Image: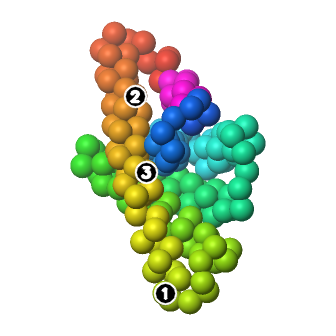
Amino acid sequence: MLAFVILIIGIALRIIPHTPNFSPLIAIALFSGVYLNKRYNLWLPLLLIILSDLIIGLHQVILFTWGAIFLITLLGIFLRKYKNTLTVIFSGILGALIFFIITNFGVWILGWYPQNLTGLIGCYIMALPFFRITLMSTIFYVTCFFGIYELVAFLAKKHNLVKILVH
């Protein structure tokens, strides 16, 4: 239950006006992989992101974006077994890198840059300022989502209110 609430808040944060590329997208995917059960963890974050994309607008690179989110959710499923502060932060950084590599490859493959090695390198270089913001937002939102969940889980267990954690 709490995990669903955090996901809905995350999607709402993506829809409301915000600094470009300062988005909870990657944190949502990681969080879903870690905290949602097998019935929801792969399709729910993707569904929420698709719905939010329908609201904020579609673009040509959307399939690369959704594919990256799917892979990052798989990373979250893997992270579930090894979750601690360090692995969560490292997974956030890795998730941002996965998103950067896949989505910018999509930009290049769709012809926004010359279809050669120079064009590919140029595409990634031009995207570095966006990556910096994406990385900062990912670390921020991963810290918030995982931190809030773990704090509430600790307090719920301490006060025997485990029902709010059921997912």
Q: Which mark is residue 118?
A: 1
Task: Identify which amino acid the numbered label 3 is placed on.
Answer: Thr
Residue count near mark 3 (Cα–Cα under 10 Å), binned few <14, some 14–19, many ≥20: many
Disc nearer the start of the sequence (3/2):
3
Residue count near mark 1 (Cα–Cα under 10 Å), binned few <14, some 14–19, many ≥20: few
| Residue 119 percent across, percent down from the top left | 53, 83
Q: Residue at x 64, y 56 (%)?
A: 66
Circles 3, 2 touching at the beta carbon (< 8 Å): no
For the residues marked 1 and 3, what is the alpha-carbon distance in whole angstroms?
24 Å
Q: Residue at x 67, y 77 (%)?
A: 111
Whether residue 39 is visible: no
Q: Residue at x 37, y 20 (%)?
A: 152
The mark lying in front, picked from 1 and 3, is 1
Task: Identify which amino acid the numbered label 1 is placed on.
Answer: Thr
Circles 1, 3 touching at the beta carbon (< 8 Å): no
Quarter occupied by the N terminus: top right
Disc nearer the start of the sequence (1/2):
1
In the image, which residues are magenta? Answer: 1-13
The residue under label 2 is 149
Total of numbered circles in the picture?
3
Q: Which mark is residue 134?
A: 3
